[in-house]
Image (cartoon, rainbow, N blue to C red):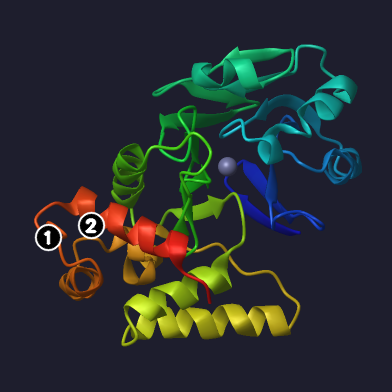
Amino acid sequence: MDIYNGPGYGIARILIEDSDSNYNYVVWCTDTKECAVIDPIDPITILNFIRDNGLMVKYVINTHCHPDHISGNDPILKVSLTMISKALIHPLGEELIGTRYDFVNEGDVIKVGNLEIKVIYTPGHCPEHISLILDNNVFVGDTVFLSGCGNTKHRGVVEDLYQSVARIRELPNDYRMFVGHDYAVDNLKFALDLEPGNENAKKKLEEVETTISENIEIPPSTIGEEKLYNPFMRYDVEEVVQEIKKRVPDLDTNDPGAIFKAIRELKNEWTS
Ligand SMILES: [Zn+2]
């Protein structure tokens, strides 16, 4: 687990053991001790953290409703101190979720104590996907990963994913990216397969491998960093476009969405 403090808030990022390298998050207001839990899969670990830090759960927020992002909802809501606690989801996830939920959508602001968490709609990995912005932090769920992006295997639409990743790419460079899973090593190896000469990707892979060997957590990357090595944010970089064209000869190189889609398809087939 690692903790990030900012003005009036704290963020706990918890890499869950025995999962698909899922990250769970607790975001709290340091003045009121109210908190929101994001994408819980491991309620026991989360509830222990909440108890040890004297926090009260106001909301569980699900970036999307894939089972590994919602399975911890009910146990957390059941024991939360405030009986008004609810799960917040995008309306398109309604049929996938249990009881006690409310909807949030593009432009909504979620209040947790004195904090204001802004919702942006980022479909593509699945139709109900949202991302959350607090200060200079963005919780992107399974839309973007360190050096990668979500797949579209479970209700996804790659054209929408392209639009959402393009939108995340427009956020300020210093925004810290909190992702749904740690797939960093595999993703960086794929990035280097596409761009063997990309020094930033090489450097990042070394950095990530060093943290793993020292048994410390991989720090969250920033939007600015991702633009240097994440192939899904480099669909309009000439070297990347030319490399994809070699592998997909009938590619329309004037269509960034088609290039993004081709990168997604290459990654689907790729094994390290
Ligand atoms: Zn997912």
**Earlier residue among tags 2 and 1:** 1
Q: Residue at x 58, y 77 (%)?
A: 208
The secondary structure type at the circle numbered 2 is: helix
Q: How far apart are the alpha carbons under marks 2 and 1?
A: 7 Å
Tell me, yes or no, whether the two marked residues, 2 and 1, touch with CB atoms within 8 Å. yes
Query: As drawn, is 219 to the left or to the right of 226?
Result: right
Mark 1 residue crowding within 10 angstroms, few (<14) / some (14–19) / many (20+): some
245 lies above or below 148: below
In this view, the residue farthest toward the front is: 250
Q: Residue at x 87, y 38 (%)?
A: 47
Which residue lies under the disc numbered 1? 253
Tell me the amino acid under the disc marked 1: Thr
Q: Is residue 23 visible?
A: yes
The percent coordinates of residue 94 (x first, y second) are 59, 16
Question: 186 and 199: which one is in front?
Answer: 186
Query: Residue 60 occupies which quadrant of the picture?
Result: top right
Which residue lies under the disc numbered 2? 259
Q: Residue at x 81, y 23 (%)?
A: 77
Query: As drawn, is 247 to the left or to the right of 185?
Result: left
Tell me the amino acid under the disc marked 2: Ile
245 lies above or below 4: below
Question: 145 and 194: which one is in front?
Answer: 194
Query: Residue 249 occupies which quadrant of the picture?
Result: bottom left
The percent coordinates of residue 101 (x first, y second) are 67, 15
94 lies above or below 261: above
The percent coordinates of residue 68 (x first, y second) are 70, 41
Query: As drawn, is 35 to the left or to the right of 130?
Result: right
